[in-house]
Image (cartoon, coloured by chain):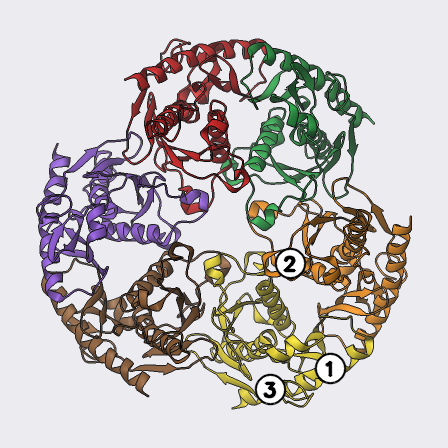
Chain colours: A green, B orange, C yellow, D red, E brown, F purple
């Protein structure tokens, strides 16, 4: 029995609320159980200097946690004057994951910035961020189509992410914070709607893990991501 | 007729939602119309070095805006590596306003940090922050009483804030963003539940203002704050 | 009897020494009793990026304290690598106050930077800064007229500032450091030569203050600023 | 035929030169072909604050590239005033990888800091760093045994790392820079001497990758790491 | 004829005004012609961590230029968030020069911080700083004697500094800004009252300089410093 | 007998290894005994903004120490977020020294950046850096000639540097770390191949030094630099 009492292959309750705030071109509150992340997509009609003149677009991401999104208060990165290594690692991962499903040529010379801000954290903030960000990005791109700036959306596929881990010898899906602390191996998997891998990041928290465990985790992640993509599709169909 | 179509002395719809997030000792989403600020109160059982050993507590505040809380995306202060002058000015104001209604001796050697993070901005984020923060602070202090750490709450009074301004020669209450841009004089007023002034900050945006205008603005602010305090009391009674 | 033995409505001895240093287009040492601030005005024939091409000018201010301008040595902000919130708040106030009396259109696309550096501090450094800075600005603008770059000075009025506070139930004018520490309410008031308010910033240091006290303080500030403007006029006539 | 003309499962020439510099407790120059990284291990007889009093040790890593280790000069991070996200990501990876093979309890309250500084870069700097760092760490731990501070080395196993990628549909081992640029999928794998996985980080550079490709890459990485561990053992036996 | 019309061996008019500001334990305005530097000495009854428990004191210096001390406005280091290399080089030089004439053992575990802030610059700010700082240090040390904290002043000798340079083939003393720009070789020399060298820093601005020129410059510097030390002695006798 | 057992006028064993790394236009490992510095020269076909449009080139230098180049580990400047005053002082010295022997007009609008990174430190890192940097610069300039970008090398002369000091009353050449700590006076001298002085920086570590000592030190430095220039010439002839 896992700490959350969920079945090994059971996701937390996942909700995707679109138009959560009013100014951004895409704005989605994503909830994986108690984890809540606000994902906004902002369109800018220019690209960073290193891409200028190539006729290509760019998608990038920034990530932050509100100071009291966590059990005990974390210090505010803006007050400390720098982003932690963890923050930078996560925002680089979100950016790469989203770029994997966007046709940057078709986007044209514009940049979309995804901001993922964690309002409440209970494990899996990076995987929730990717899953919610893809919907915010979808909405921003549809807005460019609706306004006639693009003929078709350059979103090539859906992308979603989930964490998996080994708990007492069994592979379990979508770890909340207490489970994450209790697991031996933690893996974050990012996949497309058509089942291709975009990122696989597995870390042995305690003992090194065996190939067989890796296989079980990847299997389970694939199932979970399949469900997440269905939820993404349902959200935009609503 | 003011841009918002409200009467000169009419507040926007104000909502105070308690327990908006689950980890903080006090957590309030305050809405003044489209302006939405998440205010959390975090209790720490120690005080900053300059107060150690005096048997007194401290209340401080930090303020931030999510990058896309505004019409066009603002750059993230954590990424830029410093907080703007405006941010620092606002968080100092919030901290002073709250300390004015707390008996710091009675609080004992503990610190309460209030985080005010703007999810959506439409003018008046600092006044909404103070109004919501006071409720979050109330809840955190009640928690200390409930857990037996304090015999009684050291909250001496309520404190709330509102902006007022001169629009086409008339004093108007609680400016939203379009009104704020159109007003000649902008004043932020912080008052206690018993009607004392805590802060008065008036700025001539265009022409200097006359004593008579100042009087009209203060009058109006007093009425608005009276209503806000009623809403604070109703919120905690709920 | 106030700590300084001055009458409640008595300013400290105020001196404005022009051409205190030789390189700046305007250079004024302002003294309010023991408080001494060097205010320089520097003209630059371009404006910051956000104003380019609009045919308008800009006036901005920076503020600093020499490390040993105070009773005990403060650490140097350049060595710490950032300006405090207090510093930023003061320099924003000085800049706004001066812009209130300059016709920025008439100034043309040039920027005037006012530097206010405190050589010796004894309370009221921000109000002394504004009062001295206006004279330095006047001199720099006259220089532009004298050199034929402007047909007439774009200075529309004088601007000066003073602090007031409640000491043992009585409103007193122009607080020095010991008085500032002993007062219940502290207010900084910025007014033009023709008596309009530019900024009113009142803070309850201890108990909240009443409307009646606010009125008494504003009254007193108005009188003090009237005298300061006469001193400004006398200084430039000399 | 891969760009380097190597067989798909062929490592570059790997060299491990111990005692490359004279001050550090462990100092290894690791070369993977043209990639050259200086790895030093520094022992400190105390631990960071978060571990004090627990009787446990700590192993951490820092990573840097000399400005002209690369084809065109990179700006110096010390001059820019911050480490890039990539730098932080890599040094966190190196630290985690090494901690996976150290018995931190047995190390006692001391910290070992591994510095990996890239003298010349040609792809695979992070995998070379891990491989060389483990030897430097070995030597520093042996030094503690030799000096009588530890009864036995707390190094539980070897750890080494290699990159693998898909080049024109085939899995290839140990990518140099031109190959890294030409590959579709890039994976860094960290494994122990006994064949357990410590880290698996795969990224789709272009199209998402399939499970089958992932399997082929993991297979190849396992072989390569086996050879690297033999080279580590040979180096310390010399 | 040198640009300043002075004789080759003629100092600018030098003035040392003690007690220029009121809070510091030593406060001297030093003027070398138009160069004006405020030097304050602040006594602190503790030493930096690296010296604690050794029974020795420390003397350190900080240097800054007011933004408009120069012909065109320099940006403020506190606003830029870092001190320039030049600033750090100068403050290290001032600190070393003063420590050369203080018996740090006799000073006991206290630190004296010298702040040298340039109010107006016309060449030679570092040499004027050292010359004025020594008088401020003298006064602060006398204060410790007067208050009974020290039995005798730990000042072992005077220290003063001057610049010399080659102008049109002739060695000239105490360069002002136009001369500094026109000279081929610039040398700053720091000497004690008894004629020993503390620092010699010569730089070829254009062509390398010959041993013969170096000798002429050192000769001239020695004469100038002799006069400066007389002025220091006269200042404290006044 | 000096601590190193060398004769007073004896240099350590000096080695200059060219093409030490493969990417830079000039790359030299310079060794002065155990002091090892990697000097690279990077050519960029543009100049910094302050020189644009003047048809002149620029030579600049950056300096760093690997964290464990020293006896005990130093903290990494990139991690601390700023370069120390010592680092900045050294890199400014290296840049000035090299510019003294380059015809910047003849270089044309391009910049050469010299990076001096200390792999192992045993005293004299700045003098070794200058000596090695000149050879790296030579090679980079020859490369511009070889590629037809310049008709002739703009290197006007060689430049080399050495430290000298007074040890037990005798002038000694090329101090290693233990000698540097034991010496009373430390002087760094930079001279050209034709014997002109570029920089002379002498510091009294303990007692002030006399003119006679200065003369002995300069004499010795001149001899040492003569030998270093021969080694530079031999290195490029090889």
**Frontmost residue, A56 versus F143:** F143
Residue sitting at x 54%, y 62%: C47
Q: Position of residue E42 (x, y in %)?
A: 43, 71
Q: Position of residue E61 (x, y in %)?
A: 37, 65
Secondary structure of residue under mark 1: loop
Secondary structure of residue under mark 3: loop
Q: Are marks 2 and 3 on the same chain?
A: no
The residue mark sitting in front, 2 or 3, is: 3
Residue tagged 1:
C168
Residues under labels 1 and 2: Cα distance?
Answer: 34 Å
Circle 2 Cα neighbour tier, 10 Å, few/some/many (<14 / 14–19 / ≥20): some
Q: In the rendered view, does F87 fall on the left or right side of E179? A: right
Q: In the rendered view, does B71 fall on the left or right side of E51? A: right
Residue B208: mark in rendering? none
Residue tagged 3:
C12
Name the image quarter holding residue F64: top left
- Say which chain tag 2 marks: B
Residue tagged 2:
B86
Secondary structure of residue under mark 2: helix
Name the image quarter holding residue B94: bottom right
Residues under labels 1 and 3: Cα distance?
Answer: 19 Å
The residue mark sitting in front, 1 or 3, is: 1
Q: In the rendered view, does B174 fall on the left or right side of F75? A: right
Residues under labels 2 and 3: Cα distance?
Answer: 32 Å
Q: Position of residue E157 (x, y in %)?
A: 25, 73
Residue sitting at x 21%, y 47%: F178
Sequence-earlier tag: 1 or 3: 3
On the question of residue D37 being in view, the answer is yes
Q: Are marks 1 and 3 in contact (CB under 8 Å)?
A: no
- In the rendered picture of this protein, how many numbered marks are placed on residues? 3
- Say which chain tag 3 marks: C
Q: Are marks 1 and 2 on the same chain?
A: no
């Amino acid at each position: 029995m896992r700490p959350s009492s969920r079945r090994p292959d059971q996701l937390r309750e996942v909700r995707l609320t679109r138009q959560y705030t009013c100014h951004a071109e895409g704005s989605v509150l994503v909830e994986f159980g108690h984890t809540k992340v606000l994902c906004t997509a902002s369109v800018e009609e220019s690209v960073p200097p290193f891409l200028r003149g190539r006729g290509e677009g760019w998608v990038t991401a920034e990530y932050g946690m509100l100071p009291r999104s966590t059990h005990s208060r974390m210090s505010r990165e803006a007050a400390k004057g720098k982003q932690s290594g963890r923050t930078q690692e996560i925002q680089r991962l979100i950016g790469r994951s989203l770029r994997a499903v966007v046709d940057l040529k078709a986007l044209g010379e514009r940049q979309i910035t995804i901001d993922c801000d964690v309002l409440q954290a209970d494990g899996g903030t990076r995987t929730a961020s990717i899953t919610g960000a893809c919907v915010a990005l979808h909405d921003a791109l549809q807005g460019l189509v609706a306004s006639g700036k693009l003929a078709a959306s350059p979103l090539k596929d859906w992308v979603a992410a989930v964490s998996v881990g080994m708990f007492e010898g069994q592979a379990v899906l979508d770890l909340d914070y207490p489970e994450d602390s209790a697991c031996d191996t933690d893996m974050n998997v990012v996949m497309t709607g058509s089942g291709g891998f975009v990122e696989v990041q597995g870390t042995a928290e305690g003992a090194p893990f065996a190939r067989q465990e890796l296989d079980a985790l990847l299997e389970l992640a694939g199932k979970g991501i399949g469900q997440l993509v269905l939820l993404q599709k349902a959200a935009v169909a609503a």
